Image: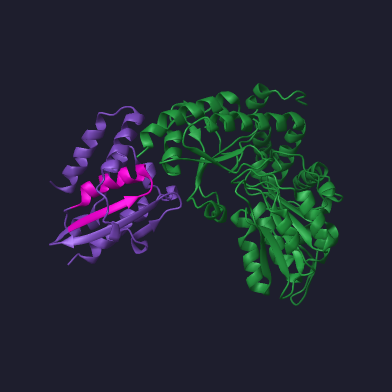
Chain colours: A green, B purple
Amino acid sequence: MQINKFDIAKIRAEFPILKRQVHNKPLIYFDNGATVQKPQIVIDRINKYYTEENANIHRGVHHLSQEATSAYETARKTIQDYLGAQHEHEIIFTKGTTDGINLVAYSFGELLNAGDEIIISAMEHHSNIVPWQMLCERKNCTLRIIPMDTNGELDLAVYEQLLSEKTKLVAVTHISNALGTINDVEHIIEKAHQFGAKVLIDGAQAIQHIPVDVQTLDCDFYAFSGHKIFGPTGVGVLYGKSEILNKMPPYQGGGDMIKEVTLHKTTYNELPHKFEAGTPNIVGGIALGTAFEFLQTLDMEGLEKHEHDLLAYATDALKNMEGITIYGQAKNKTSVISFLVDGTHPYDVGTLLDKMGIAVRTGHHCTQPIMDFFGIPGTIRASFACYNNKEEIDIFVKALHRIIPLLKH
Amino acid sequence: MTIADKEQAIIDEFAIYDDWMDKYEYIIELGKELPLIAANYKTDDRLIKGCQSRVWLHAENNHGKMQFTADSDAIITKGIIALLIRVLNEESPAQVAKAELGFIKEIGLQEHLSPTRSNGLVSMVKQMKMEALKNVK
C-alpha cells in the first residue's frame, strides 16, 4: 500500500476520527504534539489481537502464546529495521518516553559516581529534566544546562565549554515540544563522544516528523512514545547500544527479566528481556509495529515537505495578524507554532477555539523553564501532523479573527 | 433572595442564549465587569494555582454574611467567578458551605468546573466553602 506521492486526501481517509464533529463542528485536530490520531490499520490490529490472539507471551507452549510471542517479537524487528538499529535486542519496549528516560536515569545512573556531570538543555520537557535532577540528588552528580537564545535555538558554543572529562551523559531533545526547534543532535553527539560521554536523545517529538537512523546519529540511547507515532498509548521504545545496555543493571525486577531465581540469588536474562520485567503491554507493542508499517507506506520526503508547508502557511498567516507573538523561531523547525495574543489569556483562546471544533493545547506544555525564560505563563500551541491541511489552517485563522476582539480587555 | 432564587435568575438569564458564542460573550462581559479585588489582597497567599489559569480569592465574614472578592488572569474564568460570587455573596457561612451550585451545570458551563480542567475554579469553590466553614458557629 505504498502511497507514492504524498496524497493528503488518501491519508486523511486512513484516520476515522477526522470524520467526527466536536460541538457540532468538524473536528480540526491541532494537538498533535500531545498525541497523534490513529489510522484504521492500527485500530484494527488492536481489535484483532483481543478478538483472535490474546495470550501471554514468552515461554508459553500453547499455540496462542506462540502466536502472540511471534507477533510481539516481529514488531520489535519492524522497529529495529525502521530505526536502523544494529541488533533486535537493542529495542527495549517501555511504557513511553518518560519510562525510557527513567530507565536510563536509574540504571545507567547506577554506574555514575559523585562528582560526575550530566548535561541537559534549557528546552527540555519536564520528563527529560526531573529524572536527571533525581539522579543528581541520589548520586551527588551535577547537572549542567545548555542555554537557549530568544529564537529557541541552543547555544552550542556554550555546550562545548560545558563538556569535560567529568561529563558522563548528555540528554537532549531531538525536537522541542513547545517551540518546534530541531536540534543539531548529530553535532551534540559527536562532541560528547570526544569526551567519552554517552548521549540520550529524547525523540518523542521527532520520530513522526523526520527520518531517524540511530546508527547514523550514533546516539547511545533514543527514547520515544508509541502514541506520538500513530500507535497506542502506554507503549514506547528505548533504543540503546547493546554494549552499554549490557553493562547496566536491571531497572525493575520481576518475571521475564530473570534467568534463574533462588530465594537468595537471581541471575538476569539477556537483552532485551533484562529490562522488560513483568507482562508487557503486548497489544501495544504489536500495534506499535503496525504503526511503523503504516509509517513505511508514507512518502517520508513528501510528508516532511507537506508539514513544512503547513508550518510556513500558518506562520505567515499568524504573522499577518496584529498582536500575535510567536515563540520559537528557529531556522530549523518542525510543524509546531507556539504563540500568544496580546491582551488575552491562552486559556480563553483555547476555550473558544474548542467551541469551534478546533483542538489546540494551552499552558506551559510541561516545559516551565522555557516559559520562565520568555517570562510568560504559557502559550497557545498549534501542532500539525501529516493529515492536517491548509483548509483547516484557514478555518483556524478565521476563528482567531472572530474571538480575539471578544477577549481583548 | 435565597441562593436557589439567585441560581434560578442566572439560569433564566442564560436561557435566552441558544448560540454558544453569545453565551460566552456574556460571560466575558461579566468577567470584565467583575469588581477588582483590592490590590493588597492580590497576594501569593490568596493565589489558587491552576495549571491553566490563576485565581486570587479573598473572603471576609461581615456580621454573619460572607463577602468574597476574587480575580483571575483568564477572562472566562473571571466571568464564572462573577457568577459564583453573585450567588454566594451576602449569604450566611452555613448556606455557603452547603451550596451545591447546580446552576453551573444548568447553564452548560460544568466543563469549567471539572477537576481535569485545572483552571483554578474547582479549588476556588472549595476555598470559598472552607472560608465559610471557618465561620460556621
Asked whether A284 or A294 is in front, the reply is A294
Q: What residue is drawn where x is 77% and y is 73%?
A: A262
> Seen in the image, is A280 located left or right of residue B92?
right
Where are the magenta residues, as a range? B66-89
Asked whether A397 or A316 is in front, the reply is A316
Q: Position of residue B10 (x, y in %)?
A: 22, 39
Asked whether A385 or A159 is in front, the reply is A159
Q: Position of residue A235 (x, y in %)?
A: 67, 49
Q: Position of residue B76 (x, y in %)?
A: 35, 42
Q: Is residue B81 magenta?
A: yes
Quadrant of the image occupied by residue A329: top right
Task: Give the answer, above or below, for where A295 lies relative to B84.
Answer: above
- Quadrant for the C terminus of chain B, please: bottom left
Task: Give the answer, above or below, for where A307 lies relative to B57.
Answer: above
Q: What residue is drawn where x is 70% and y is 38%?
A: A209
Q: What residue is drawn where x is 76% and y is 62%?
A: A257
In the picture as drawn, the residue positioned furthest to the bottom comes out as A264
Q: What residue is drawn where x is 72% and y is 25%?
A: A6
Task: Give the answer, above or below, for where A33 lies relative to A97.
Answer: above
Quadrant of the image occupied by residue A105: bottom right
Residue A270 visible, this angle: no
Asked whether A149 or A76 is in front, the reply is A149
Q: How many marks?
A: 0
Q: Position of residue B15 (x, y in %)?
A: 25, 31
Residue A326 visible, this angle: yes
Q: Is residue A355 magenta?
A: no
Quadrant of the image occupied by residue A5: top right
